[in-house]
Image (cartoon, helix red, strand yellow):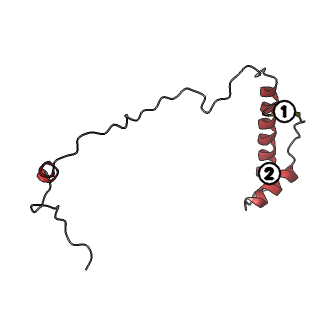
Amino acid sequence: MFLTFGLTKIRFQIMSVTEKDVKYIANLARLQLDEEEVTSLAGDMNKILGYMELLDELDTDNVEPLEHVIDLESRLRKDEAKEPLSHEDALKNAPDADSDYFRVPKVIE
């Protein structure tokens, strides 16, 4: 398997995950696992590493790196300056207002 950093390609061999590795990781994460869970997780982690080896066989030399697997367009509206509300329009739908301000119930004594 190769890891690429810019133009540098480093070859490394994927190792398998042992039950000792799973126990070490579980200890770091403060997880308490029984022996059945340790065995199951070691198998799952090794399957993941095996899949990574399978993916490594793909030729990705001419594939552009992606931020997302699909191209996403911005769904936000354009930030355009518009005419602000007039003072009267802003206070028009207020439940309680005097001539200049919104009136709200007192919340601090």
Q: Could you say where residue 105 lies in the image, as x and y percent from the top left? A: 19, 69
- Residue in front for this viewpoint, 38 or 92: 92
- Identify the mark nearer the N-term, 1 or 2: 1
Residue that numbered label 2 is attached to: 38
Q: Nearer the viewer, mark 1 or mark 2?
A: 1
Residue sitting farthest toward the bottom = 109
Would you say 96 lies left or right of 63 here?
left
Residue that numbered label 1 is attached to: 8
Callout 2: 10 Å neighbours few (<14), some, many (20+)?
some
Q: Residue at x 62, y 33 (%)?
A: 67
- Quarter holding residue 77: top left
Element carrying mark 2: helix
Q: Residue at x 89, y 40 (%)?
A: 15
> Can you say which quadrant of the picture contains the N terminus?
top right
Callout 1: 10 Å neighbours few (<14), some, many (20+)?
few
Q: Could you say where residue 11 lies in the image, as x and y percent from the top left? A: 89, 33
Would you say 30 lies left or right of 2 here?
left
Distance from label 1 to label 2 (Cα)? 36 Å
Q: Could you say where residue 20 lies in the image, as x and y percent from the top left? A: 87, 53
Would you say 86 lies left or right of 74 here?
left
Identify the amino acid type marked 1.
Thr
